[in-house]
Amino acid sequence: MGVLPVPAEVRAILLDIEGTTTPIAFVQETLFPYIKDNVKEYLRAHWEEEECQRDVGLLRKQAQEDSSLDGAVPIPLESGSGEEELERVIQAVVDNVHWQMSLDRKTTALKQLQGHMWRAAYATGLVKGEIFEDVVPAIRKWREAGMKVYIYSSGSVEAQKLLFGYSTEGDILELFDGHFDTKIGPKVESESYRRIAASIGCATNNILFLTDVPREANAAEEADTHVAVVIRPGNAGLTDDEKSYYSLISSFTELFLPSST
Ligand SMILES: CSCCC(=O)C(=O)COP(=O)(O)O
Ligand SMILES: [Mg+2]
């Protein structure tokens, strides 16, 4: 087992979810198929609700921005009433969601809808958020040492709270001091890490960001945030350059806090 000393100036640990706290397989083989299989039925059942209409509005706006992309799927406005017209628009939303998911896009519009759809899957016990076994004990230790702990995922804050609120370890939301999603900015842009630091009320170099994705680590580092790349079973491989450049950990237990005994 390796040991990675945490710089003394670090006051907060910022955690990615997929590939860091949680197996990629859980997201790709459980959460995402649930959306693909249920989106049409969900839209039919919730179409008249304000939240659903807000989600569709966001998806429509995103579709307009995406109109020049290969394979993009537009979402028309409902013109008139009637079952057939409703089905036409719903089918366009379904096709748009499937298209975005085929590219694993991280748009806020897609992530908002996904978060709302997973509510029922978690609440009925169909799905439980999977978490690597080292995660909870390590976070407890960090918190005892006075560290603040935050989540930053492309998954919406609502989706994050469901995953940790209905997890294989029970409701562990109390372990986190806050949550960030793409509303603060994309994970591959350094400005997002400056905004997160401002929101936490610290300097960017008071934060250590743990992620499986080198592009995200690179963006955080550009903002002067400390980073470590997490290697978990099922994660994408790293290049030799990435392996030698980044601090790597394969378990949260490898982080060594200055005050740890
Ligand atoms: C928060 S649960 C769903 C995860 C998700 O939708 C996703 O895109 C994962 O992105 P991450 O930034 O956690 O790698
Ligand atoms: Mg990730």
Image (cartoon, rainbow, N blue to C red):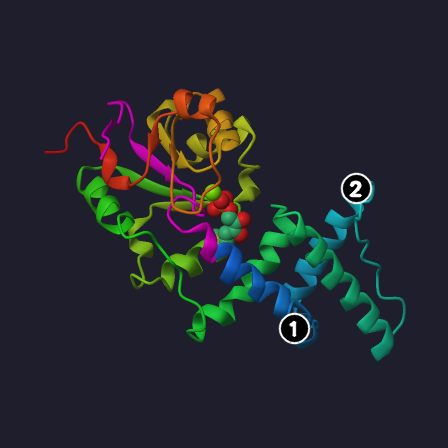
| Gap in angstroms between the C-alphas marked 1 and 2 | 29 Å
Depicted 65 relative to depicted 30: above or below: above
Q: Is residue 14 magenta?
A: yes
Answer yes or no: do the residues labelled 1 and 2 have beta carbons within 8 Å?
no
Q: Residue at x 45, y 73 (%)?
A: 126
Q: Is residue 23 left or right of residue 171?
A: right
- Overall secondary structure of the magenta stretch? loop
Coordinates of residue 94 in the picture (x, y in percent): 72, 63
Depicted 92 relative to depicted 142: above or below: below
Q: Quadrant of the C terminus?
A: top left
- Inspect the image, locate mark 2, and give the three-letter code of the amino acid beneath it: Leu
Work out whether residue 156 can be spotted.
no
Camera-near label (1 vs 2) is 2
Q: Is residue 110 left or right of residue 79?
A: left
Determine if the C-beta at disc 1 is less than 8 A from ligand 1.
no
Total residue callouts:
2
Tag on residue 21?
Answer: none
- Disc 2 target residue: 69
Q: Nearer the viewer, residue 182 or 54?
A: 182
Give whichever of discs 1 and 2 has the lower sequence position. 1
Q: Is residue 66 magenta?
A: no
Q: Residue at x 81, y 66 (%)?
A: 89
Q: Is residue 148 left or right of residue 188?
A: left
Coordinates of residue 26 in the picture (x, y in percent): 45, 57
Q: Residue at x 32, y 51 (%)?
A: 132
How crowded pointer 1 is (Cα within 10 Å; few <14, some 14-19, many 20+) is rated as few
Q: Residue at x 18, y 37 (%)?
A: 145
- Inspect the image, locate mark 1, and give the three-letter code of the amino acid beneath it: His
Q: Which residues are magenta?
A: 1-26
Q: Secondary structure at mark 1?
A: helix
- Disc 1 target residue: 46
Depicted 100 relative to depicted 249: above or below: below
